[in-house]
Amino acid sequence: MKHFAEVSLNGQDFGVLWKPPFRVNVTAAAKPGVNHLRIKITNLWPNRRIGDEQLPPDCEWNGDVIKAWPQWLLDGKPSPTGRLTFTTWHHWTKNSPLLVSGLLGPVLLQTAEVISAR
């Protein structure tokens, strides 16, 4: 995993992991049998922008700078092209390389036996 992840097990939230070692103790929520592990990963902003660049433009550009505020934005409406983000400057193109991000393997579920001191 790289950057950010929210972890929950059987509906119990274990917060946001944002730095190595990206580990969480889920013992309190684990139960015998089937468990439901949920990991929500946050992708990086450049990757989202590069993804939106795959869609048609939703405003006019003067080089890398926006020419004018688009009417759909002024009206508080979503982009007519399906883009999820909007900026006034072109930082990336549809051919920009994606940054390494997401749930990167290996993902391990480890068990341990708790031995109490006498």
Image (cartoon, helix red, strand yellow):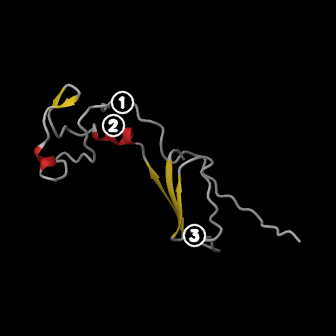
Dot 2 lies on which element?
helix
Measuring from the top left, give residue 49's x and y in whole percent: 32, 39
Disc ID at residue 72: none
Q: Distance between the residues labelled 2 and 3?
A: 36 Å
Compared with residue 64, is residue 106 higher up or lower down, i.e. above or below? below
Question: What count of labels does the image hold?
Answer: 3
- Seen from the viewer's position, the closer of residues 93 and 89 is 89
Q: Which amino acid does label 2 sit on?
A: Ile
Residue extending farthest top: 63
Dot 1 lies on which element?
loop
Residue extending farthest bottom: 32
Q: Earlier in the sequence, mark 1 or mark 2?
A: 2
- Residue marked by disc 3: 35
Please report the residue visible at 50 percent of the width from the left and 45 percent of the height from the top: 3
- Tags 1 and 2 touching, CB below 8 Å: yes
- Residue marked by disc 2: 50
Please report the residue visible at 53 percent of the width from the left and 64 percent of the height from the top: 8
Disc ID at residue 96: 1
Compared with residue 117, is residue 77 higher up or lower down, i.e. above or below? above
**Residue 94 position by quadrant:** top left
Q: Which amino acid does label 1 sit on?
A: Ser
Dot 3 lies on which element?
loop
Measuring from the top left, give residue 70's x and y in whole percent: 13, 42
